[in-house]
Amino acid sequence: MTQQAKDCTCLSWRRSERIIKSSEITDQFKNIGFGSFKTEDKPQLIKDLFRCAMDYYTDFDQFNKTRRNSIALLGHPGSGKTHLLTAISNNLMQKKSVSVLYFPYVEGFNDLKDDFGKLEQKLERMKRVDVLFIDDLFKPVTKEIKGERVKVPRATEWQIEQTYAVINHRYLNYKPIMISSELTVDEMFDIDEALSSRIYEMCKDFTVVVKGDRKELNHRLED
Ligand SMILES: Nc1ncnc2c1ncn2[C@@H]1O[C@H](COP(=O)(O)OP(=O)(O)OP(=O)(O)O)[C@@H](O)[C@H]1O
Ligand SMILES: [Mg+2]
């Protein structure tokens, strides 16, 4: 390898190291890839989920600057939504030098709600980063209502307002988002139509909703 080629490799390595550091993806998730995702003996929906994520990563350069440049993996807990979106993130950062920001919806907003300065700074980064990964959007909390346990989405007016500002900015500027959520598209529309219809339009080409038998779909329940 020539000195120039070595310098170049070193520069691009340093660049992706910087990108990875600022992504806020935790150490535990930094090594997650597509290779460790099992599809054998899994239901067709899990195979579809995997294929959707792979296709999104492979074709990313083709649609990056278009309106339909985003991905939404929705539905059953433990089906691998976070795993696959993390695999896309790690690959985009390491192999395509694309910057990604990981935003876990519940913890992210809890951390920001009492600190206006921090909130403004974070919202700016969420608007500007190449790809924004919102994990567990509207993550439901289980409540007992009239003796029945029901899942209620977490979506305060404030959370909706902040999320809308970020998504609308990205929508208008053709910037991709990656969303995981237990909610279906309809359930999201019930929360806020203006926000959800933008997400729907952006993710139209890469949306999978996993619904069905818990024992088959929740990988955490595998022996
Ligand atoms: N098909 C799979 N092959 C290998 N590991 C998997 C697979 N599906 C999920 N996992 C692993 O199971 C665990 C749960 O997956 P993950 O967190 O991605 O699920 P999720 O759909 O995001 O769930 P939740 O809605 O609860 O956040 C993770 O440790 C993940 O790496
Ligand atoms: Mg998850």
Image (cartoon, rainbow, N blue to C red):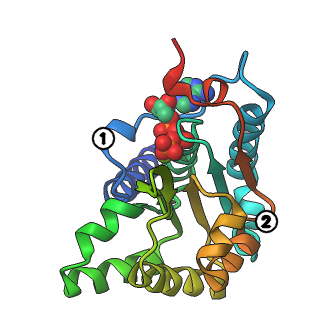
Inspect the image, locate mark 1, and give the three-letter code of the amino acid beneath it: Asp
Report the residue marked by disc 1.
27
Q: Report the residue at 68% width, 79% height from top.
A: 198
> Which type of secondary structure does the marked residue at label 1 adopt?
helix
Q: Nearer the viewer, residue 180 or 189?
A: 189
Does 173 sit above or below residue 145?
Answer: below
Residue drawn at point x = 81 percent, y = 61 percent = 205
Q: Secondary structure at mark 2?
A: loop
Residue type at tag 2: Lys
Query: What residue would you read off at disc 2?
Result: 204
Residue located 44% across and 51% down the image = 147
Q: Point out the frontmost of discs 2 and 1.
A: 2
- In the drawing, what numbered circle is on residue 57? none
Q: Position of residue 43 (x, y in %)?
A: 76, 26
Which x, y percent locates residue 151?
Answer: 50, 54
Residue 26 in view, yes or no:
yes
Q: Is the residue indicated by label 1 positioned so its CB lies within 8 Å of ligand 1?
A: no
- Give the residue at the far top of this rendering: 223
Indicate the position of residue 139 as horizontal and vertical percent values: 47, 58
Residue 14 rendering spot, x and y as whole percentages:
35, 53
The quadrant where residue 42 appears: top right
